[in-house]
Image (cartoon, rainbow, N blue to C red):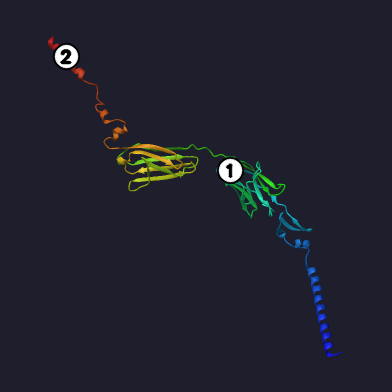
Amino acid sequence: MDVTMIHTVGCFLKTRNILLSWICLCIMAADYSKALKPTRSSLKSELPSSFQRMHQNDKGHRYFTDRGYATRTPEILATKKNYTVKRGNLAILHCTVQNLGTKTVVWRRASEENPLTVGDYTYVSDARFSTQHKVRLDQWNLHIRNVSLEDAGTYECQVSTKDRSIRREFNLDVQDLPIYNAAIKITGKRYVDKGEPIVLSCNATDYYAPHDIDWFKDGDKLNSDKLRGIEITKSVYLSRKTITSVLKIKKAKMTDAGDYLCRTSERYITTIHVQVLNANTSNNVKRGTQSGFSRGANRGPSIVPAKCVLLLTMILLFLT
């Protein structure tokens, strides 16, 4: 056997030994990893309860059991069912849904087939209805803004399933607000001496407190003006549904006489006529009299008839 043949046989044996060693190492590594790999049941026992839930699928949350994976059914928790709201306020119906997964929460009136909201979307054309999703609390709450008496009734929170078996009903009672009679009036002196202040007060009451009050004189709007001595103040009393405005003119002039009008933002209107008097005529006008009628008004009984009787008596005595 020559040298070349010996070298070829040696290389073959060396390569075979390397391959056999690699195969043995792979077999040993596979057996070792299999021995260390835990089963699902053993892994479940090692995990804390807070980590039992793994992920979601189309039905709900999946978690480990002794037999493998299982699915939790969506659940609507028992919460407050009866709500009372005053007309015009915001109504909020709370619905807490756990293990929702990829399902959708639907709100509808129990008496109607069509939904009000589907998930985060409002299904009806009435923009007063909307859904607020609080993720951390698993809440899908129905909001009704500016609630009316017609909104009272039974509402249903439902998880979208074929048989509509996961649902809960809520009752909404809407109370009417007390009735306030709209009224507006002006108080103040109708007769003012020249140089004296003119003070007029306007009170307006409505179902909701009026937003504003405007003053007009003979059709022209009045505003606070220091140069003209005009001051306008306003006060709002929400508890009494009232707004009050005071108009003050520091020194009345003859041109300040006229019709003063008070108007609210709701177009309730009232007027008062103010007369500015001169010093020579103010007393008589305030008493409702005129100077021509005062002449001789306090005269006593006439003495002319007595003088005539005395003269006739003296004549008769002289003739006799």
- Identify the residue at the far bottom of this view: 2
Amino acid of disc 2: Leu
Identify the element where label 1 is drawn: strand
Q: Position of residue 80 (x, y in %)?
A: 65, 46
Q: Residue at x 41, y 40 (%)?
A: 262
Query: Is residue 76 shown above or below 305?
Result: below
| Residue 38, picture quadrant | bottom right
Residue assigned mark 1: 85
**Horizontal arrangement in the rendering, residue 118 relative to residue 308 (left or right):** right
Q: Quadrant of residue 309?
A: top left
Viewer-proximal residue among 308 and 271? 271
Residue name at image x 15 percent, y 14 percent = 314
Expressed as whole percent of the image width and height from the top left, the position of residue 183 reads 46, 37
Residue 149 drawn at (x, y percent): 58, 40
Residue 166, numbered label: none
Residue 236 rendering spot, x and y as whole percentages: 45, 44
Image quarter hosting the N terminus: bottom right
Give me the residue at 40% from left, 45% from top. Answer: 233
Q: Earlier in the sequence, mark 2 or mark 1?
A: 1
User: Is 307 displayed left or right of 59 in the figure?
Assistant: left
Residue closer to the observer: 169 or 236: 169
Callout 2: helix, strand or loop?
Answer: helix
Q: Locate the C terminus by quadrant.
A: top left
**Residue at x 39% of width, y 39% of height:** 261
Name the residue that disc number 2 marks. 312
Number of the front mark, 2 or 1: 1
For disc 2, the neighbor class at 10 Å (few under 14, some 14 to 19, many from 20) is: few
Q: Nearer the viewer, residue 224 or 304?
A: 224
Task: Tell me which amino acid carries mark 1.
Answer: Val
Distance between mark 2 and mark 1 Cα atoms: 100 Å
